[in-house]
């Protein structure tokens, strides 16, 4: 864990988002930080710059332009993301622009390993945008959801990916616990609507998403499709499977 220690005054969040999207610094890359740019959209950064309450307690999995957008408004921001090189680039870019990062704590660990050990505390805004492989976003959600303050906000990125879509569908079905505030392209914003437990210790029988799937199992066509795919996958040689996969996904 490292803690930034600059002491530069906070900057106007909208202006900082402008700077980000004018300069387009690259922060990402597992082997070589700065070799990739997987930034969240400008629409989301603008939304964060406007809606994150000033001085609030915020947290994200993954890091990048969202980190910079959060930190301009947040009073204390935590980042759970494994690659320290990405954190250094974010801090360096902020320092070069005179942007204070002293209230940001970077935890350089995969979120699925770090979040279970995180000391519990209430959060005003949370963004899930780290590892998108199954079941990482669900682990992020499981260990963070109960700490989102009543009326606090939860953002789920990449709802076009299967894992993001399942989490989105699940949260939409949890009508007594989460309200869909808006969709910013492939990023969904939910508000926690009450203070009852939402994740830890919850029974499957109290989850409409699970209940609905129990009552209405996936359709027959879907079952046939999956059956054909597993037979094809078992019997066809790789040279035939690859072009078929390209054609039919
Ligand atoms: C899509 S990018 C995040 C984009 C970022 N929100 C932005 O606005 O630029 C995914 C991020 O997740 C990080 N990541 C990869 N594996 C992770 C894991 N297991 N836990 C948390 N973060 C992870 C990557 O290093 C990267 O910073």
Image (tube, helix red, strand yellow):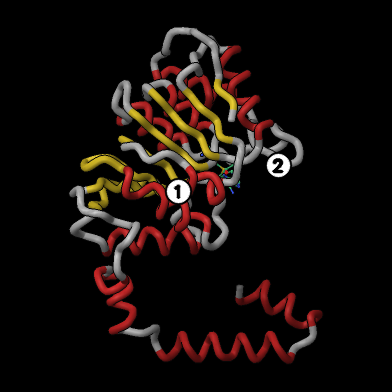
Q: Where is residue 179 in the image (x, y as percent from the top left)?
A: 23, 52
Instruction: Give the number of the mark in front: 1 or 2.
Output: 2
Q: Where is residue 141 in the image (x, y as percent from the top left)?
A: 41, 52
Front-lying residue, 207 or 163: 207
Front-lying residue, 5 or 13: 5
Q: How crowded is the residue under tag 2: few (<14 C-alpha within 10 Å), some, or many (20+)?
A: few
Front-lying residue, 140 or 240: 140
Residue at (43% x, 32% y) in the render: 45
From this view, report whether residue 68 is shown above or below residue 239: above
- From the viewer's perspective, tell me whether residue 158 is left or right of residue 34: left
Q: Residue 147 carries which label?
A: none
Q: Where is residue 225 in the image (x, y as percent from the top left)?
A: 53, 87
Residue at (28% x, 77% y) in the render: 212
Residue tagged 1: 157
Determine whether the beta carbon of the residue marked 1 sits less than 8 angstroms from the nearest atom of ligand 1: yes
Residue at (62% x, 87% y) in the render: 230
Q: Where is residue 248 in the image (x, y as percent from the top left)?
A: 61, 76
Viewport quadrant of the C terminus: bottom right
Residue tagged 2: 30
Q: What secondary structure is found at the residue carrying circle 2? A: loop
Determine whether the beta carbon of the residue marked 2 sits less than 8 angstroms from the nearest atom of ligand 1: yes
Viewport quadrant of the N terminus: top right
């Amino acid at each position: 864990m490292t803690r930034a220690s600059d002491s530069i005054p906070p900057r106007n969040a909208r202006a900082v988002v402008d700077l980000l999207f004018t300069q387009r610094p690259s922060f990402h890359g597992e082997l070589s930080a700065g070799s990739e740019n997987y930034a969240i959209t400008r629409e989301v950064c603008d939304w964060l710059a406007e809606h994150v309450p000033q001085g609030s307690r915020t947290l994200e999995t993954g890091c990048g332009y969202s980190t910079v957008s959060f930190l301009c408004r947040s009073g204390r921001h935590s980042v759970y993301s494994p690659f320290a090189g990405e954190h250094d680039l974010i801090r360096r870019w902020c320092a070069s622009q005179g942007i204070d990062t002293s209230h940001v704590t970077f935890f350089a660990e995969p979120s699925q390993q770090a979040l279970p050990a995180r000391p519990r505390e209430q959060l005003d805004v949370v963004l899930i945008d780290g590892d998108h492989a199954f079941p990482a976003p669900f682990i992020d959600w499981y260990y963070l959801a109960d700490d989102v303050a009543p009326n606090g906000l939860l953002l789920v990125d990449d709802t076009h990916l299967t894992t993001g879509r399942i989490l989105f569908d699940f949260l939409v079905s949890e009508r007594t616990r989460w309200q869909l505030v808006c969709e910013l392209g492939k990023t969904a914003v939910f508000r926690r609507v009450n203070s009852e437990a939402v994740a830890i210790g919850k029974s499957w029988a109290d989850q409409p998403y699970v209940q609905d799937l129990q009552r209405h199992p996936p359709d027959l066509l879907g079952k046939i499709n999956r059956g054909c795919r597993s037979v094809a996958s078992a019997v066809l040689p790789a040279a035939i499977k690859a072009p078929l996969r390209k054609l039919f996904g």
